[in-house]
Amino acid sequence: MDIDTKTIWSPLRKQLPVKEFDRTLGMLSQYYHFITVQQSIDILSGKIPPIDNALLITFDDGYRNNIDYALPICEKYNIKPVLFVATNHVNSGLPFWFDRLDYALQQNAGEVISLSYNNEVYTFDATSRNALTISYKKFRDICKDKFSDDIELNNLFDYLCETLEKRSASALKDICHEDDWSAIVTWDVLKRLTSDNRIDVASHTQDHLRLDCLIKSKILSQIKQSKICIEKELAVKCDYFCYPNGNYNKLSKQLVKEVGYQAAFSTDVGLCQSKDDLMTLKRFNFPAHKTIPELLFLFNTK
């Protein structure tokens, strides 16, 4: 969320302005009925009758700004969202690698940066913010295609971050608790909000790893231990799951179901229907910067 206020730093990735979030939800509220995650699954599984023009609002990862800035706007429109959290990040309060590396690169800006790891050279053009934005996105896209093992990929990220942090003597972990961009929500806050019935909390694994890039034992640990953790910390049932980065395969779908989740959300684009597989439910990215006709067209053609 772009919080529309002065902050310590600004991520390279595009952010959603608070005012735009409010504007879009306001338009959607005129035509759609916001439902909870439980209602959505009950409808899709045939337990309750369909609700016309029903929409569910979801947040991925567990950023604190979802609570501080987005939740008040959701409540303005009587929305109870579901927040998918990576439990080890909530436990530690440490930032995600994509924010950590983003920050580390910006602290070394002003030149072309070249770093070697396992006989590979990784180059970032940090001569300007625009150049770094393009370079960083290209790096992320290449890594996602190149690495089929997410443990190996995260080792690369750790090395790059540590090297850059040593160069600049600055690390996101040192400021993230005060940073509106990267701070992770705490269990205390989540417990208060779930107790007050203001949000639902569900699993996004322990470490935000791509499940189709892990061996079976790692997949099982990530999905099972995160479920156990949420249920222990919040004293609620954790029945829903969201695939990090939208990545899943036949094995991960099977294990998610076997562990006991009622449904799992992907990043496949489209509307959900009663015939859909509950283990690969589709979603839309938040439809910002659109007019009412564009919104109505979007949700009636997918």
Image (cartoon, rainbow, N blue to C red):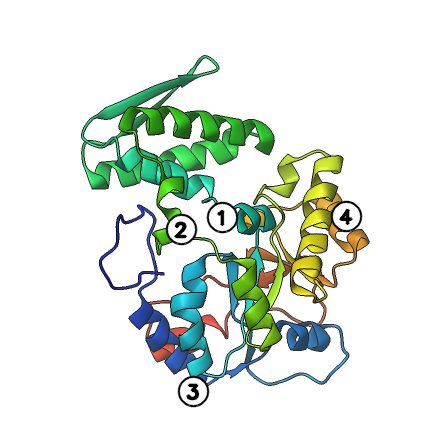
Q: Secondary structure at mark 2?
A: helix
Cα separation between marks 2 and 3:
37 Å
Q: Position of residue 97 (x, y in %)?
A: 45, 39
Q: Residue at x 55, y 65 (%)?
A: 190
Amino acid type at mark 3: Gln
Task: Name the residue beneath numbered marker 2.
Answer: 177
Residue farthest front in this picture = 188
Cα separation between marks 3 and 4:
39 Å
Q: Residue at x 36, y 61 (%)?
A: 1
Amino acid type at mark 1: Gly
Disc on the earlier residue, 4 or 1: 1
CB under 8 Å between callouts 2 and 1? yes
Viewer-nearest of discs 4 and 2? 2
Vertical placement of 136 versus 37: above or below?
Answer: above
Q: Residue at x 35, y 20 (%)?
A: 115
Disc on the earlier residue, 4 or 2: 2
- The image quarter containing residue 188 is bottom right
Task: Name the residue beneath numbered marker 1.
Answer: 93
Q: Residue at x 47, y 29 (%)?
A: 158
Mark 1 Cα-neighbour bin, 10 Å: few <14, some 14–19, many ≥20 = some
Left or right: 117 as drawn, with respect to 36: left
Left or right: 64 as drawn, with respect to 37: left
Amino acid type at mark 4: Leu
Mark 4 Cα-neighbour bin, 10 Å: few <14, some 14–19, many ≥20 = some
Disc on the earlier residue, 3 or 4: 3
Disc on the earlier residue, 2 or 3: 3
Q: Secondary structure at mark 3?
A: loop
Task: Name the residue beneath numbered marker 3.
Answer: 30
